[in-house]
Amino acid sequence: MAPTINKKNKKCIIVIMASGVTVLLVLALIIGINLAKEPDKKELKLVHIIFRHGIRTPADTYPTDPHVNDTLYPVGWGQLTNEGKMEMYELGKFLRQRYDNFLGDFYHPNEFYSQSTGVDRTKASVQLVNVGIWPPKTKQIWGPLNWQPIPVHSELLSQDMLLLVRKPCAAYHKERDKVVASETVQKKFQENQALFNYLTQHTGRLVENFDDVQDIFSTLKAEMDYNLTLPSWTNECYPDKMLEATVFSYTLNAWNDKMNRLKGGVLLNKIINDWKSKVNERDLEHPQKAFLYGGHDSTIVNFMRTLKVWDTQFPNYGVTVLLEFSILDGEYGLEVYLRNSTSVPPFKLNIPGCNDFCPLTKLLEVTRNVVPINWEEECENDGSYEVPEPGGP
């Protein structure tokens, strides 16, 4: 026999069911609100692009070089090859694809700034990258070429105070002398003495340090890239033995915080000021969006070691650093990417002491020791130390 439900129990059941429905409706409403609320999105505000110039012909030579009297006509010494020109143009197209929506369709001088060192191959490289980034559209199409002129700024090479920092700085060289005299570095010298001797014997020039090896390595690499035949003696040392010593030369020239503060720290300081300006920017019609810097191997290594994100490697032609400054959850911060290959996407790097998105306040804290306050004063150019002439580029 089925149980019976009296009126009192039926009322209780109805109340319980109604209460349950109310709870479910409230939960559904809360969940619906949460689902409807979009998460905060990261918004790109400013990008800095720093790259090494494209593939070039040899910029220097050595006494026994079989190509020492070659004019390299019609390209010339230390100039971009056709392969290097295409490499730079393709870099520009990559940047257009990556930042297409952010940059917009039209070049405007208040929004985009490009600068190179005072060297032909970097000036040409920046021009070619700009061709890839800024093909003219609609009202900026002016004639028969799918191209528009974009200004490229530069400093006199001897007065460079951004991408090479070539003005004399006694404090930098004093610190470097101390590093070279250290037990760690002297051991490296001893380990490579046989290589120094071998290169001295075969090149006809005195090779006594790692920068000397880098100079010859760069010449041999450029000659090989230009399809020039290398002498047979290079089979014993090029590229492997020389590559290790060459890579160490970059490390040696950006060894510690004091040295980096006076080299790569100059560029970092300028970029930090750009970020601060962006934070304080208010409703400009054409706000600054991007800075493009064309430099050299040392430009890349010095800057990246200043940020402490450089893995020991050879900074090949076209290697590119992307600094993306964004706002996320109301906070401004930085993401760093390195593009050292065209076959894989740029990979993200973490600044020590930061997450992959480094808030500006934290970034200022962790880079405090590598940003000069007054470069001129810190360089101690009082005449008591003879600053050597800069080499390269």
Image (tube, rainbow, N blue to C red):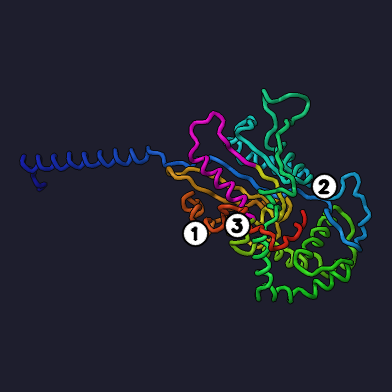
Three-letter amino acid code of the residue under disc 3: Glu
Can the viewer see residue 5? yes
Q: Earlier in the sequence, mark 3 or mark 2?
A: 2
The residue lying at 21 percent from left, 39 percent from top is 22
The boundaries of the magenta stretch are 263-291
Give me the C-alpha separation between circle 2 and circle 1. Answer: 40 Å
Sort mark 2 into few (<14), some (14-19) or many (20+) by Cα contacts within 10 Å: many
Image quadrant of residue 170? bottom right
Secondary structure under the numbered disc 3 in the rendered image: helix
Q: Are marks 3 and 2 in contact (CB under 8 Å)?
A: no
Sort mark 3 into few (<14), some (14-19) or many (20+) by Cα contacts within 10 Å: some
The residue lying at 63 percent from left, 39 percent from top is 97
Look at mark 3 in the image and give the residue it sits on: 378
Per the rendering, the mark at residue 177 is none
Can the viewer see residue 341? no
Image quadrant of residue 253? bottom right
Q: Nearer the viewer, mark 3 or mark 2?
A: 3
Q: Nearer the viewer, residue 293 or 223?
A: 293
The picture places residue 47, in percent across and down from the top left corner, at 58, 43
Look at mark 1 in the image and give the residue it sits on: 353
The residue lying at 73 percent from left, 24 percent from top is 142
Q: Is 166 left, or right, of 266 in this rendering?
A: right
